[in-house]
Image (spheres, helix red, strand yellow):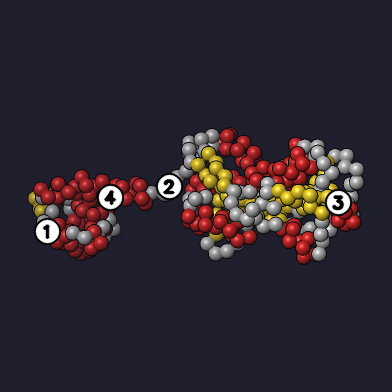
């Protein structure tokens, strides 16, 4: 028998007949009229080439074949009702799920400490894993399920099939060491052009500020070019180099190093940081919960509340 030719609703009818032993009562339980229920029982008999239920007094009793089939049919119907059709629930306090996030090192620094603190308090068994990859690869990672979310600046993910929530906006500032001999409370364009610079160009990532300078025809003397933002701190605090970075990263560096920052001498671009996910995870209850946690911790309203 080819399962593609079987109406699985007939198993529900079979199960109702096992329970009620009466065509009318079984039909009422399934909200079927008596003619519709009788027709379904007839189709069952044809499907299994057996009467299945025969009259004995006031009841329709199962035949030996129906008795043989009954445990399997009950199990199938219960599996569909309990494991397939019942809404899935998610309990963060007991879940041991691992979430994989695509994120650059800046987002790791800015988001993971607070997020891990939140998880330790309310979801102590949940684990996080981060992946750093070129921005073009992020879409494929989310589409394939290799990662569930991406946090950062991913212009390629502003397209059909992906959802997003804005988290923060970050302007660019100039990071210098404390006691820098040439940079005071303000930095002029002439000073910026004459200074020595450290520049970060992560592989495969969007270099927003570099593109901005190029569009304005502004050139600098770049002494060192790095692949990772986190390498900047020891370099800037032990030299007279200037590094232009997003302000949220500069705030972190100021807290952990002997550095300070000043505004750029030109109106620099603002980067919008979003949380992205693929539509395949839109209804996943665990995913919904983590998205809500991230948005609550890092959305503009959360920043104001803090």
Q: Position of residue 290 (x, y in %)?
A: 55, 46
Q: Residue at x 73, y 46 (%)?
A: 249
Q: Which is more toward the observer, 110 or 125?
A: 110
Local SS, label 4 = helix
Q: Residue at x 20, y 45 (%)?
A: 71
Structural distance between the alpha carbons of marks 4 and 2: 18 Å
Q: Residue at x 54, y 34 (%)?
A: 124
Asked whether the beta carbons under mark 2 and mark 3 sit within 8 Å of each other, the answer is: no
Local SS, label 1 = loop
The residue where tag 4 is placed is 77
Q: Position of residue 69 (x, y in %)?
A: 17, 49
Image quadrant of residue 160? bottom right
Q: Which mark is residue 191?
A: none
Q: Which mark is residue 88?
A: 2
Q: Which is more toward the observer, 190 or 159?
A: 190
Local SS, label 2 = loop
The residue where tag 3 is placed is 195
Of the numbered discs 4 and 1, the one sitting upstream in the chain is 1
Asked whether the beta carbons under mark 4 and mark 1 sit within 8 Å of each other, the answer is: no
The residue where tag 1 is placed is 49
Q: Residue at x 36, y 50 (%)?
A: 84
Does residue 128 appear left or right of residue 21 in this picture? right
**How many C-alpha atoms fall within 10 Å of the one at disc 1: few (<14), some, or many (≥20)?**
few
**How many C-alpha atoms fall within 10 Å of the one at disc 2: few (<14), some, or many (≥20)?**
few
Q: Residue furthest front?
A: 223
């Amino acid at each position: 028998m080819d399962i593609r030719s079987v109406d699985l609703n007939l198993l529900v009818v079979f199960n109702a007949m096992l329970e009620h032993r009466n065509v009318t009562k079984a039909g009422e339980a399934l909200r079927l009229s008596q003619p519709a229920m009788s027709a379904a029982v007839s189709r069952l008999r044809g499907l299994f080439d057996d009467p299945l239920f025969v009259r004995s007094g006031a009841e329709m009793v199962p035949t030996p074949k129906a008795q043989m089939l009954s445990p399997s049919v009950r199990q199938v119907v219960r599996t569909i009702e309990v494991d397939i059709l019942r809404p899935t629930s998610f309990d963060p306090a007991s879940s041991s799920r691992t979430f994989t996030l695509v994120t650059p090192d800046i987002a790791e620094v800015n988001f993971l400490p607070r997020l891990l603190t939140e998880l330790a308090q309310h979801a102590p068994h949940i684990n996080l894993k981060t992946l750093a990859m070129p921005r073009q690869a992020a879409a494929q990672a989310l589409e394939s399920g290799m990662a569930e979310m991406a946090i950062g600046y991913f212009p390629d993910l502003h397209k059909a099939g992906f959802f997003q929530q804005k988290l923060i906006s970050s302007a660019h500032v100039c990071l210098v060491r404390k006691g820098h001999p040439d940079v005071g409370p303000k930095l002029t364009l002439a000073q910026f052009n004459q200074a020595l610079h450290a520049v970060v160009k992560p592989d495969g990532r969007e270099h927003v500020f570099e593109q901005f300078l190029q569009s304005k025809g502004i050139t600098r003397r770049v002494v060192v070019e790095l692949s990772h933002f986190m390498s900047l701190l020891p370099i800037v605090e032990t030299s007279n180099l200037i590094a232009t970075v997003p302000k949220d990263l500069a705030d972190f560096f100021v807290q952990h190093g002997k550095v300070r920052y000043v505004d750029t001498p030109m109106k620099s671009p603002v980067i919008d940081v979003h949380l992205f996910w693929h539509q395949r995870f839109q209804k996943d209850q665990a995913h919904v919960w983590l998205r809500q946690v991230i948005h609550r911790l890092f959305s503009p309203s959360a920043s104001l509340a803090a």
